[in-house]
Image: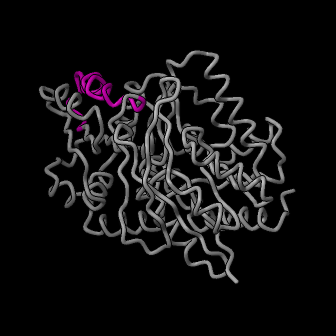
Amino acid sequence: MRRSVAIVHDGYVPSYRVPLYEALGRIDDLHYVVFHSEPPPESAHVAAHPPFAFDHRHVPQHMLRVVGRRVYHQRLVREIVSEYGAVVLGAWLRYMSNHAIRLAFQAAGRPVVLWGHGGHHLARQETGWPQPLTRACETAKDRLARSADAYVAYTQTGARELVATGVDARRVYALQNTIDMNAERELHARTTAVGELQIRATLGVEANTPVLVFIGRFLSEKRIQDLVGLARTVNAGRAAPARFVLIGDGPLRRHVEALAADAEHVSVLGPLDSESAACWLACATAVVVPGSVGLVVNHAFAHGVPIVTSADALHGPEIEYVQHGRNGLVVDDVAAALGELIDSPGKREHLAAGARATATRLRLDSMVDTFDTAVRAALNGACS
């Protein structure tokens, strides 16, 4: 008989998670079911929508304010507690319903698997929070991690940091969080089959024009608002000015469009489909994110494009994949680094080769295997 495992992670289904959930849905002897609602409207996240090729449940979600912060309750506790043999919960404090499920499962002796950043949460303090609240959240996350039958951390760094805080190493698994890299690499191959010159002609970009791409959500933590100033600094006195192309959407989009209104070499394109984005990546010298990077690292590397970002930004766990000087640049002065990169074809090719090499190691099938192994270990009591 198939054992049923509920997954309650992001609160919604991000597009990049669909291939993972599809792969888990093809496993014969475990029945994975994804519970989801809609992303909070202020988050600028975009949800994928059914039909899905995996079992799922859409549930109502309610937002409340606690100590001035948004917290959420999803109407799924009764169904999961009564019908599922194990649960995978996002290791986030903001979902009140997750805590009710965890406590009920632990009281019944059923396994709880946490899925989160791991020890990386210690470096992600919310700016503007009072220090006592920040410390209380860190303590709560540490206790939450220790309470789990297994913890699947986004990356190896997060897993190591968890163990360093006292979590039993036998219960910790490193997923190496990724997207469907094979699909992105195949898209890149199809896109570039016509040659870069033809792609540039279609996009209206001259052969000698460097192209620098931002792709992601238009949020302050990504420092998207700094890109127009960066473009002016990089292009000052340059005979062949670089084209800065900003792809995505979010709360700061209109603000950035206003900043770029008189910036001749900055194009704010908004959200693009994957094929159109792939055309720009095929021409790109680098993907530039002045602030926080996350899975954009994987996206860029799948297309053979290095990442350039700031050393002092509050990065997501995927910053682990960026090796300075090998597949990207993590620097104090982004404008200076971009100028040097534009002027050094050898350096560009070296970093691009490193990006392509890293892409081959960030495999979705490995992530699926690790996830499933952790759940089975929890179900079989191997983590106790």
Q: Please tell me which residue lies in front, 186 or 197.
A: 186
Q: Is residue 202 left or right of residue 120?
A: left
Q: How is the image coloured?
A: one colour
Q: Quadrant of the C terminus?
A: bottom right
The answer to which image quadrant residue 170 occupies is bottom right
Numbered range of the magenta stretch: 221-243
Q: Is residue 142 left or right of residue 260?
A: right
The answer to which image quadrant residue 217 occupies is top left
Q: Please tell me which residue lies in front, 72 or 26.
A: 72
At a point 22% along the width and 42% down the height, the residue shown is 209
The answer to which image quadrant residue 254 occupies is top left
Tell me residue 118's x, y (percent): 67, 42
Tell me residue 21's x, y (percent): 52, 67
Q: Please tell me which residue lies in front, 323 or 139.
A: 139
At a point 69% along the width and 50% down the height, the residue shown is 102
Q: Is residue 376 left or right of residue 75?
A: right
Q: Is residue 357 visible?
A: no
Q: Quadrant of the N terminus?
A: bottom right
Tell me residue 138's x, y (percent): 67, 29
Q: Is residue 185 left or right of residue 268?
A: right
At a point 34% along the width and 44% down the height, the residue shown is 215
Q: Please tell me which residue lies in front, 286 or 66.
A: 66
At a point 41% along the width and 71% down the height, the residue shown is 52
Numbered disc total: 0
Name the magenta segment's main secondary structure.
helix
Tell me residue 125's x, y (percent): 58, 26
Q: Is residue 138 visible?
A: yes
Q: Magenta stretch: residue 10 in it?
A: no
Q: Is residue 70 above or below residue 189?
A: above
